[in-house]
Amino acid sequence: MDDEAQERQLNIHLDPEQMAGVYANFANVTFSVYEFTLTFARIDHEIEEGDVPGVVVSRVNMSSQFFQELLAAMQDSFSKWSTQEGIRNLPEAPPRPDAG
């Protein structure tokens, strides 16, 4: 075997009922000495009075090391998305008059 590290591939199984994912429009981050917890919820913002109803759609507990890696990956993806959207939303240059 080579001294170079062999490339490893992830083989992640996704159940068909999880394929669509879940929708969340609210997130809460909490932490303890040992871990971070991300709680995702779907909130009904159309309610004008009283308590705002919502339902937790997912909760993920993770180590602080994984949280740091996730945060870096999210910042990288957001930066790439922002660049792509910025290019897509540039105004068209006005036609230049012929210099003749």
Image (tube, rainbow, N blue to C red):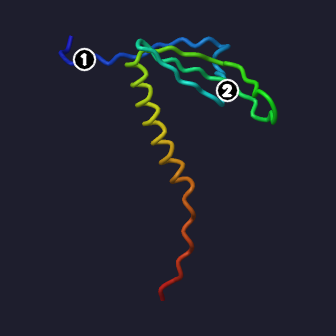
Looking at this view, is 77 or 10 the one in front? 77
- Image quadrant of residue 26? top right
- Image quadrant of residue 39? top right
Q: Name the residue under label 2.
A: 23
Compared to residue 60, the image places residue 46 above or below, namely below
Q: For numbered disc 1, what is the local secondary structure?
A: loop
Instruction: Give me the disc on residue 97.
Output: none
Q: How crowded is mark 1: few (under 14 residues within 10 Å), some or many (20 or more)?
A: few
Q: Which residue is drawn at 56% across and 74% down?
A: 95
First reached walking from the N terminus: tag 1 or tag 2: 1
Q: Which residue is drawn at 55% across and 53% down?
A: 88
Q: Where is residue 30 in the image (x, y as percent from the top left)?
A: 52, 20
Q: Name the residue under label 1.
A: 5
Q: For numbered disc 2, what is the local secondary structure?
A: loop
Q: Which residue is drawn at 73% across and 23% down?
A: 54
Q: Where is residue 19 in the image (x, y as percent from the top left)?
A: 63, 19
Q: How crowded is mark 2: few (under 14 residues within 10 Å), some or many (20 or more)?
A: few
Q: Is residue 9 left or right of residue 89?
A: left
How many numbered marks does the figure carry? 2
Inspect the image, locate mark 1, and give the three-letter code of the amino acid beneath it. Answer: Ala
Which residue extends farthest front? Answer: 50
Inspect the image, locate mark 2, and give the three-letter code of the amino acid beneath it. Answer: Tyr
